[in-house]
Image (spheres, rainbow, N blue to C red):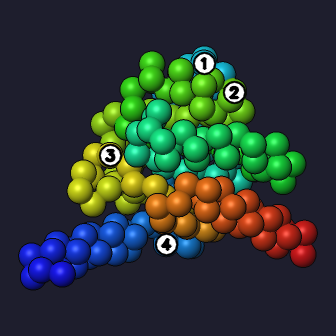
Amino acid sequence: MSSRSHTLACAAALLCATAAQAALKVGDAAPGFRTPAAVAGEAFEFDMAAALRQGPVVLYFFPKAFTQGCTLEAHAFAEATPRFAAMGAKVVGMSHDDIDTLKRFSTEACRDQFAVASDPQARTIRAYDAGAAANPARADRISYVVGQDGRIRFVHVGPDPLEHVRQSELAVGRLQQGARQ
């Protein structure tokens, strides 16, 4: 490996580590927000506080609608949404995409199962420290489970879209178990 290649590889690893460390921590207060969202192709205003009154929220950030990884992740969350609902949790995805794009994505990729929220100004992306290292206005792949008390209960940062679904489902299960005790 050349010195230049090694330097670039180290820089890329540092950027990834920095992004992973930027996520909010378990126990932090989850920032409240209201933003345009879509489910089943229909636009509405998503209100985090109202959603939390109904149960925990799985809030996952994704980089861009209709890209390979984000579509795969949406399909997996769509398949898992009934299991999340059975545990009392609501799923919502968020990206910087505009609402018209997300109206289509909510039907085609999310299969009408859960809402996707639009954050074109990256206000919520910044509030959740979910910006990509290379472009902070664009979301990184970060998943949060927020308890009904408004606290972050679980955080997962990583490139594997399917692992976000698996880990979030396990976290909601643990949260549900803790509520029973």
Q: In the visual, does 81 lie left or right of 12?
A: right
Q: Is residue 158 above or below residue 134?
A: below
The residue located at (63%, 68%) in the rendering is 153
**Under tag 3, what secondary structure?**
loop
Res 149 visible = no
Q: Residues within 10 Å of mark 3 (few under 14, many from 20)?
A: many
Kindly identify which numbered label has been placed on residue 112.
2
Dividing the picture into quadrants, the one containing residue 168 is bottom right
In this rendering, the count of numbered labels is 4
Ranked by sequence position, the earlier of labels 3 and 4 is 4
Q: Is residue 100 above or below residue 71?
A: above
Asked whether disc 3 touches disc 4, contact meaning CB atoms under 8 Å apart, the reply is no
Q: Nearer the viewer, residue 175 or 76?
A: 76
Q: Nearer the viewer, mark 1 or mark 4?
A: 1
Residue type at the position of mark 3: Arg
Circle 3 sits on which residue?
138
x, y percent for residue 23: 42, 66
Q: Residues within 10 Å of mark 2 (few under 14, many from 20)?
A: some
Circle 1 sits on which residue?
41
Ranked by sequence position, the earlier of labels 4 and 2 is 4
The residue located at (23%, 74%) in the rendering is 9
Tell me how far mark 1 sits from mark 4, CA to CA.
Answer: 33 Å
Q: Nearer the viewer, mark 3 or mark 4?
A: 3
